[in-house]
């Protein structure tokens, strides 16, 4: 019977990933076509080449797994032998790379804007989430003593001299991502005018379309002048981060972030000023003498770019912001991690008779106040009272869910995120019963929820809930010492390094919040925004949950319970994006009704999550 179930499981897995998921993606792209009104990228030649390369890479990787791994290419039933030959010698997870190229090639071949701008990026994020939230962890568990190194990996973090492989690999990723980013920004933004500012027209003779080639030559030279692997590694990571930030800002806010590219075809080869500055930073860390020559060259190139940009002032603001965020990512991370550890050990409580007030309640109280105020401004005063009813119902369901899943003698009043998601259904029904459009509440709630959740994660840090599992890396881990924290009094991890999963969540929710706020500003439908909210938060939760270490969370078939709920939530989100409903008429704007409602909501959530009765054993009585 066990063998039959094993064979059936493999068969079901193969059907799901080879037929059901690709078919689902096709339907998803087809039925969101009327919603995703973005530029078409169509080329029969380019699409055909991408499909052939992607398909060949997938087949090559699958054959390598079966030949060298002695098993099938299925992560749920992994081969017993680690494969480092064939495409696995070049880079990690070649099946996913091949599928990504095949998928993008098909949508380029058919000219599907929904496939390019919606289905492809979300599917790629899904594959990344699967790797980070399951496959990488499973590989380390099954092969703990094996070190995997591929041709296109990052250089080691050492002072040794980099080899030609390190230099070419770093250059490959930087140039590839730079050209792809520039291409997408150009296609997406088109001739979007700048928010403000004008070009720096000191001398119009500098608008030669071949000048961007000098930028690329400058970047190509950098890896061959860096003499230490750690400097090359930092240059590559900073460069990739800067390009990612530029793409994110350029697509969301093209009037601000897409103004550095010149108005001619060679824009694809433009290396922006932030990338030049990152290169100079790496050079100066090594030796100031050659760095001076590179500084002179970079100054000339930046002047050319300022002349050809759409807005000089916007370009300067943009590249300084991106440079600071990308070049100092290590210092930024250390600051955020250390701050998280301080907050995690900042528990304070005040007892008044039989009532206790805990300081972490102020975080969620403020989050509820801020979220309801923003929602009231976005939806208008007509929905102020409905937002209060909605917030209370969602909070109540969050408590009921966690009581069923995690409630115990030590956890009298826990709260669970997915209970709040279920509460959205009942909250929207209550809004409809009030004679208002529930989709408006769902849409605006989706816009503000990432911000509310991010602020609420500060409570999780203090309370110790949603905490991470052990980490052996002091650069990543934080320590808990306060005896009131769940980390200490339930999980028994006092003083041990653990993953700051609450911080992981905050960082992800920040970017999700920016995306959804932008979509609302651009008048996307409420159900589409709600669908994206479910998809994006589920992808982040799938990865986050893999690094969480709460002992009361059940594990089912190798995945945490909340990883399964994240998968289910993402599927619901995909379904929501294809639903088309006429938008309701609203009157957004600041109003005092929303201020009052936000205050009441904030006080309610503060009481629910920050005030308890420490001497009682009644269900829902104690928070700790």
Image (cartoon, grey):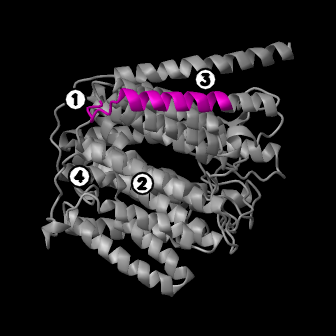
Q: CA distance from mark 4 to mark 2?
A: 16 Å
**In the rendered image of this protein, does residue 265 appear above or below residue 216?**
above
Q: Is residue 374 visible?
A: yes
| Marks 4 and 2 close (CB-CB < 8 Å) | no
Label disc, if present, on residue 264 of the rendered structure: 4
Disc nearer the start of the sequence (2/3): 3
Label disc, if present, on residue 13 of the rendered structure: none
Q: Residues within 10 Å of mark 3 (few under 14, many from 20)?
A: few
Residue 38 painted magenta: yes
User: For this rendering, which residue is in front, 526 or 321?
Assistant: 321
Judging by the rendered image, the residue that carries numbered circle 2 is 178
| Marks 1 and 2 close (CB-CB < 8 Å) | no
Please state the total of marks drawn on the protein image.
4
User: For this rendering, which residue is in front, 587 or 103?
Assistant: 103
Residue 522 coordinates in the image, percent (x, y): 23, 42
Disc nearer the start of the sequence (1/2): 2
Judging by the rendered image, the residue that carries numbered circle 1 is 583
């Amino acid at each position: 019977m066990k063998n039959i179930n094993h064979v059936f499981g493999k068969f079901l897995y193969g059907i799901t990933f080879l037929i059901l998921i690709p078919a689902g993606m096709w339907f998803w792209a087809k039925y969101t076509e009327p919603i995703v009104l973005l530029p078409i990228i169509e080329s029969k030649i380019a699409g055909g080449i991408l499909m052939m390369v992607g398909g060949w890479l997938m087949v090559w990787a699958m054959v390598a797994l079966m030949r060298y791994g002695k098993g099938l290419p299925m992560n749920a039933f992994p081969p017993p032998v680690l494969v480092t030959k064939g495409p696995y010698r070049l880079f990690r997870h070649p099946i996913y790379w091949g599928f990504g190229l095949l998928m993008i090639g098909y949508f380029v071949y058919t000219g599907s804007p929904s496939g390019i701008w919606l289905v492809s990026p979300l599917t790629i994020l899904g594959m990344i989430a699967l790797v980070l939230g399951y496959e990488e962890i499973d590989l380390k568990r099954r092969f703990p003593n094996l070190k995997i190194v591929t041709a296109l990996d990052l250089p080691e973090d050492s002072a040794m001299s980099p080899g030609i492989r390190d230099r070419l690999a770093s250059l490959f990723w930087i140039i590839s991502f730079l050209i792809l980013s520039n291409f997408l920004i150009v296609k997406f933004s088109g001739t979007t005018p700048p928010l403000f500012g004008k070009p720096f027209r000191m001398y119009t003779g500098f608008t030669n379309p071949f000048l961007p080639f000098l930028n690329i030559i400058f970047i190509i030279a950098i890896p061959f002048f860096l003499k230490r692997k750690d400097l090359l590694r930092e240059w590559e990571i900073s460069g990739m981060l800067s390009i990612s930030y530029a793409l994110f800002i350029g697509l969301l806010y093209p009037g601000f972030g897409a103004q550095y590219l010149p108005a001619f075809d060679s824009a694809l080869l433009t290396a922006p000023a932030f990338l030049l500055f990152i290169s100079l930073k790496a050079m100066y860390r090594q030796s100031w003498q050659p760095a001076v020559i590179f500084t002179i060259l970079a100054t000339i190139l930046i002047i050319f770019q300022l002349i050809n940009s759409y807005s000089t002032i916007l370009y300067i603001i943009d590249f300084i912001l991106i440079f600071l965020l990308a070049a100092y990512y290590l210092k930024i991370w250390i600051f955020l991690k250390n701050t998280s550890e301080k907050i995690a050990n900042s528990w304070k409580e005040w007892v008044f008779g039989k009532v206790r007030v805990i300081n972490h309640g102020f975080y969620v109280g403020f989050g509820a106040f801020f979220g309801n105020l923003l929602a009231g401004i976005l939806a208008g005063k007509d929905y102020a009272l409905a937002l209060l009813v909605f917030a209370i119902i969602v909070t109540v369901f969050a408590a009921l869910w966690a009581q069923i899943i995690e409630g115990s003698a030590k956890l009298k009043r826990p709260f669970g995120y997915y209970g709040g998601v279920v509460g959205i259904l009942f909250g929207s029904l209550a809004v409809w019963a009030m004679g208002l459009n529930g989709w408006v509440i769902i849409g605006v709630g989706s816009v503000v929820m990432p911000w509310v959740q991010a602020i609420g994660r500060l409570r999780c840090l203090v309370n110790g809930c949603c905490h991470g599992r052990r980490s052996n890396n002091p650069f990543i881990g934080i320590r808990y010492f306060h005896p009131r924290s769940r980390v200490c009094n339930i999980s028994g991890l006092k003083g041990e390094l653990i993953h700051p999963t609450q911080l992981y969540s905050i960082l992800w929710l920040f970017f999700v919040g920016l995306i959804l706020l932008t979509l609302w500003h651009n008048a996307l439908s409420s159900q589409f925004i709600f669908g994206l909210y479910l998809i994006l938060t589920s992808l982040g939760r799938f990865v986050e949950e893999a690094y969480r270490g709460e002992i009361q969370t059940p594990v089912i078939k190798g995945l945490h319970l909340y990883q399964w709920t994240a998968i289910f939530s993402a599927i619901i989100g995909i379904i929501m994006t294809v639903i088309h409903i006429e938008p309701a008429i609203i009157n957004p704007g600041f109003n005092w009704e929303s201020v009052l409602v936000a205050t009441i909501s904030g006080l309610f959530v503060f009481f629910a999550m920050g005030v308890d009765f420490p001497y009682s054993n009644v269900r829902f009585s104690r928070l700790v």
